[in-house]
Amino acid sequence: MKVRFTVNGHAATVEGDAEMRLLDALRDVLHLTGTKEGCGEGECGACTVLLDGLPVNSCLVLAAQAEGREVLTIEGLADGPRLHPIQQAFVDAGAVQCGFCTPGFVMSTYALLRDHPAPSEEEILTALEGNLCRCTGYVRIVDAVKRAAVQLAETRLGEARARARETA
Amino acid sequence: MLRYVRVDTEAELLDALRKDGAQLLSGGTDLLVKMRSGLVRPKSLVDPAAVAELRGIETAGGALRIGTATPLSEILASKEVRERAPLLVDVLRVLGCVQIRNRGTLGGNLANASPAADSAIPLLLYEANLELAGGDGARNVPVGGFFLGPGRTVLQHGEYIRAVRIPASRQNWIPFFHKVGRRRALTIAIASIGGLAAVSQGRATEVRLAAGSVAPIPLRLKSAEEWLAGRALDRETIQHAGALAAGEVSPIDDVRATAAYRRAVTGDLVVRFLEGAAAA
Ligand SMILES: Cc1cc2nc3c(=O)[nH]c(=O)nc-3n(C[C@H](O)[C@H](O)[C@H](O)COP(=O)(O)OP(=O)(O)OC[C@H]3O[C@@H](n4cnc5c(N)ncnc54)[C@H](O)[C@@H]3O)c2cc1C
Ligand code: FES
Ligand code: FES
């Protein structure tokens, strides 16, 4: 079976049997190993990717179900060697220890901050409910999300100022 | 070897589901977990995501029709659902987590027939009907008549739930939903209680109660409801209703809680709901 979809803006074709999960397609066929497999049954969120912009557990999606759709993984966030502001915020807040859960948390955060640039504490907790971390405790992770929100807002402001200068 | 079949029309869906070993795959949040642990071994997975009749939310007056392959997050975001069935929104908001709600569907939650299926509670309370198709032809079944036991429903081979219909109901319902044993969304409830109450001058005009995880199937608590109808919601009436509710469930002991605890929680939550409704 052949499945075609878009990964991080690039067209991809994977071949495999019907059991192949989106997680397997990403990790084993496309070698995008940033997406992790923790539990394999929807409980931990380590395998979180965005499917047509929405966070899903890629361990609970068949590759075939992604046919024709857009997938965004952790590899699609960084700009070359430069970490995405959300990744940087996780590092700065000390929200990364073993790092196994981090890609999933970052993807959930990415979707949250796209829809709610200044989320409340409750919105943050709801958005991250499906992601488990065994190491850091959630205080640091919530702190990381707040830092990322501020950083992204500053970046947007800077861009707007630059545009204003150009047109002036 | 397993086959994956994406169907585009309802005619194709009907055909594909008649095949031996065919099983519907919607969000996959129950089925793929079960397949992985070897509990079920379908020969083909039929994905209805592209079938228009099973997708989307429609309104007709105060009534709602929700396609059973509509992702839960889409139902949650719907203004029409929030207006017409606010308790459904309250419940779906605490079903699983974002990732699960972006994939999971009402069709899967109902057909899976877990005693803990959260969506069953508001649908029982709103007295929703299920539009079934396939099998020997189309038929409508009230949610209250759909479940037969844990993992068992009235669905026949080749039959599926096309849509959930929620009839227009009172505007002035006081809603209630409480799930016990919810640690970061991902544990199955120990007990869940939902209710709708219409109260006028301290008197219960109508009360509906439903419970999950405390019997083989999610169910309405009829004897407590009947006791409450038309009564003033005083302390004694409320206590008695709680006792009736606790007597009406048939919970089991398991690793998460004892039957006695589940029974007590049922009574307590019904009392809590009615006290709130009396004070509202
Ligand atoms: C981490 C996690 C947390 C969860 N939390 C909760 C929770 O809090 N509360 C809760 O109630 N559930 C919970 N669930 C269970 C599950 O997510 C829900 O039951 C979900 O709604 C299932 O929908 P689905 O589309 O993913 O079903 P699928 O897995 O696609 O299907 C489930 C079953 O239903 C059948 N089916 C699907 N659609 C139809 C249809 N239209 N007609 C007939 N049969 C159909 C399938 O053949 C299969 O047998 C959780 C699951 C996980 C993995
Ligand atoms: S690996 Fe997918 S949720 Fe844990
Ligand atoms: S940093 Fe180790 S699991 Fe989260």
Image (cartoon, rainbow, N blue to C red):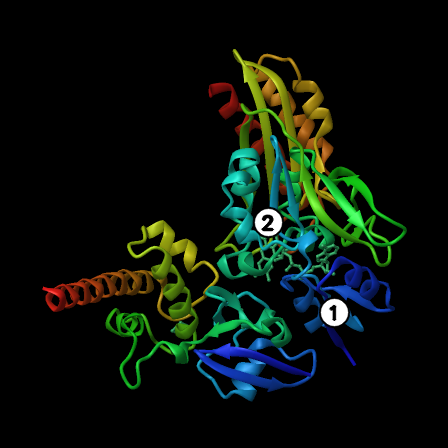
On residue B89, which mark appears?
A: none
Helix, strand or loop for disc 2: loop
Residue drawn 32% across the image and 53% down it? A119
Is B250 displayed left or right of A131 in the figure?
right
Q: Chain of mark 1?
A: B
- Quarter of the figure with residue B226: top right
Left or right placement of residue B209 versus residue A75 in this view? right
Which residue is at a point 26% across and 70% down the rendered structure image?
A89
The amino acid type of the residue labelled 1 equals Leu
Q: Residue at x 61, y 42 (%)?
A: B58
Q: Could you say where residue B1 lies in the image, as x and y percent from the top left? A: 79, 81
**Residue B119 appears at what percent x and percent y?**
63, 45
Residue bearing the label numbered 2:
B189
Mark 1, Cα crowd under 10 Å, few <14 / some 14-19 / many 20+, is: many
Q: Quadrant of ligand 1?
A: bottom right
Q: Earlier in the sequence, mark 1 or mark 2?
A: 1
Q: CA distance from mark 1 to mark 2?
A: 29 Å
Q: Nearer the viewer, mark 1 or mark 2?
A: 1
Q: Check mark 2 vs ligand 1: CB closer than 8 Å? yes or no.
A: yes
Which is more toward the observer, B186 or B27? B27
Q: Which residue is mark 1?
A: B45
What is the residue that sits farthest to the right in this orientation?
B136
Using the rendered image of the protein, determine whether residue B93 is visible from the camera's viewpoint.
no
Residue A127 shows in this picture: yes
Which structural element holds mark 1?
A: strand
Residue at mark 2: chain: B
